[in-house]
Amino acid sequence: MLEHITIEPEKTADACLIWLHGLGADGHDFEPIVPELGLSDMAIRYIFPHAPIRPVSINNGDEMRAWYDFQFHSERGSTDDVQASADQIRLIIDQQLDAGIQSHRIILAGFSQGGVIALHTALRLHNRLAGVIAISTYLHDPQSLETELHDENLALPIFMGHGQGDPMIPIMRAATARENLIRLGYDVTWHDYPMAHQVCLEEIEDIGAFIRRIL
């Protein structure tokens, strides 16, 4: 199983948020976000996995933590990597189920590459989740989703947030993902912010409100 950071609540956990970092970062990247969400009164366990280290084509093959080998202008070129990472996240979900957390109390969240994996995993899962938080990201291979989505997670609540000036993943790519998800019947909450490829305080507050609503 992937190495990960776990932050336990003061009370016995009855919910779990699994948060996936972006390219080149690690699980510590979003660790500081926990107190900023304003959810200290809720018994949420936070899990921040570290992606495997692999060569990344867009960075001249340099090795770094990545959920998949990102290739420009390739919708399906990284599918094997994406699926392998999704399988690893499913193991973490299974571990939480075994620990007594009900599936409808589990949220998958991800930034950039992590958001791709969160969406890919959740929409194909045979267990009903609480929702997905997909920020500064896009939908990998939407054509395959139409045949691989699982009925358990139809109409799943999805939070999508994006920077209006994101130079890494243009906002139109995220908006196209939003439209595909809405067309397939998912309950998408969309926010965009005057920022680049990053997270801002307003977005963190909106995410906290979303988590409180779906749990």
Image (cartoon, rainbow, N blue to C red):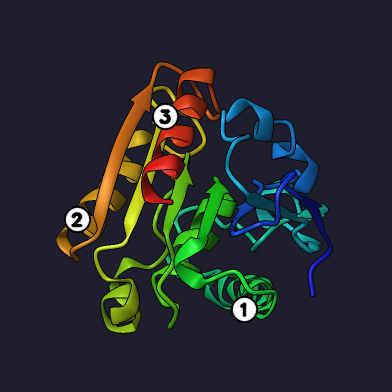
Q: Is residue 84 above or below residue 184?
A: below
Q: Give the percent coordinates (x, y) of residue 152.
A: 33, 78
Q: Where, quadrant-wise, is the N terminus in this rendering?
A: bottom right
Residue drawn at the location 39% of the way across and 58% of the way down: 139
Q: The disc labelled 1 sits on which kind of residue?
A: Asp
Task: Say what secondary structure mark 3 lies in.
Answer: helix
Taking depth in this image into account, of 186 and 70 the one nearest to the observer is: 186
| 3D distance between C-alphas at marks 2 and 3 | 20 Å
Dot 1 crowding, Cα within 10 Å, few <14, some 14–19, many 20+ = some
Label at residue 87: 1
Judge left or right: residue 192 versus residue 41: left
Dot 3 crowding, Cα within 10 Å, few <14, some 14–19, many 20+ = some
Q: Which residue is mark 2?
A: 182
Disc nearer the start of the sequence (2/3)? 2
Q: The disc labelled 3 sits on which kind of residue?
A: Asp
Disc nearer the start of the sequence (1/2)? 1
Q: The disc labelled 2 sits on which kind of residue?
A: Ile
Dot 2 crowding, Cα within 10 Å, few <14, some 14–19, many 20+ = some
Judge left or right: residue 95 versus residue 97: right
Quarter of the image for residue 157 reads bottom left
Asked if the residues shown at circle 1 and circle 2 are in contact, with their CB atoms under 8 angstroms apart, the answer is no
Q: Which residue is mark 3?
A: 206
Judge left or right: residue 38 versus residue 157: right
Q: Give the percent coordinates (x, y) of residue 144.
A: 33, 77
Disc nearer the start of the sequence (3/1)? 1
| 3D distance between C-alphas at marks 3 and 1 | 29 Å
**Comparing labels 2 and 3, the label whose residue is closer to the camera:** 3
Q: Give the percent coordinates (x, y) of residue 128.
A: 40, 73
